Image: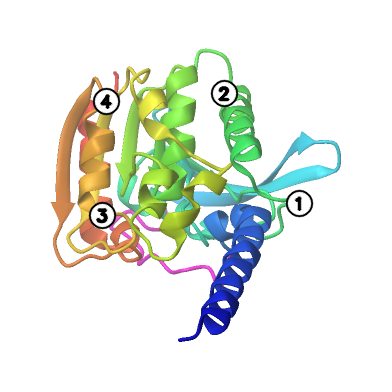
Amino acid sequence: MTPLALGAFALTAVSSYAALSSLFWANQKRLIFGRTSNIRVLKAGPLAGQHAVTPLWLTVAPGVQLEGWVARPQHGGAGKTLLYFGGRNEHVGWAAGMSSYIGPWSVYAFNYRGFGASGGKPSELHAKADALKILDEIRRLEGEGARAPAVMGRSLGTAMAISVASQRDISQLVLLSPFDSVRSLVRQRIPLNSMCWLLHQNFDCTGDARQVKAETLILLASKDQRVPHKNSFLLASSLRNLQHLGTVAGTNHKSLPRLAQTQARIAAWLNETAPH
């Protein structure tokens, strides 16, 4: 290759990197959060038909409402509540179905900004701030004297669950495919690994994890190509009250939360360790 051709090649490479970097900087909120598609199905559990599902709306900013649902026991509950935070691309409309496994609990879930019918645009700052507002709204709806809610997150949602647990009183914490930080995940992906310095949506979960006091359950997919187990182990090492870390056979990143075996293990742990 002649010096002229080499120079042209270098200039093209630099230009391409600059263009890709600009796209990454401008679109990383959407790249990280993704876009919701169809609501995935959770097969009904052994307690199906014992809860009533009600739609909810929560105003989190002027002109911005979050779409949510609550599944409440039809014949009186035990005063126990579970709040679920979804992962990337996830419409949480399916989450109310977890009530058919968990028993006489109320199960809440809200879509992030820009997901489903929720208004606004997603970002780390907004998602974490909204998560606190959601938890506070649940405490209001459940009434004074209600037990502290349990909180559950999957994948990206574990960042919101851990953030809430580090700042509010919660009873239990369930994490599915948790990770230490988005930066750590990006470093493992070519060609995005060269753009770590551009990240402004960091989701550094380890710092928040060190502040969590609640008893914690972690479940991992047996085969996970989105969140490597080593990243989950790094996060787990920061938790001061980790009670159990296990894998669910025959699952991958997407199937983990909607397998009956996963839901049964979550329900058993929540009911066994719930404060009385």
Earlier in the chain: of badge 4 and badge 3, it is 3
Q: Mark 1 = which residue?
A: 119
The crowd level at tag 4 (other Cα within 10 Å; few <14, some 14-19, many 20+) is many
Give the Cα distance between marks 3 and 1. 32 Å
Q: What residue type is labelled 3?
A: Pro
Q: Mark 3 = which residue?
A: 228
* Residue found at x 58% / y 81%: 4
The local secondary structure at tag 2 comes to: helix
Image quarter where the C terminus lies is: top left
Q: Which amino acid does label 4 sit on?
A: Leu
Q: Mark 2 = which residue?
A: 139
Earlier in the chain: of badge 3 and badge 2, it is 2
Image quarter where the N terminus lies is: bottom left
Q: Mark 4 = which residue?
A: 239
Magenta run includes residue 182: no
Give the Cα distance between marks 4 and 3. 18 Å
Q: In this view, does 131 lie to the left or right of 235?
A: right
The local secondary structure at tag 1 comes to: loop
Q: Is residue 159 left or right of residue 56?
A: left
Magenta run includes residue 42: yes
The crowd level at tag 3 (other Cα within 10 Å; few <14, some 14-19, many 20+) is some
Q: Can residue 70 be seen in this view?
A: no
* Image x and y of residue 209, in percent: 35, 26
Q: In this view, does 270 lie above or below 260?
A: above
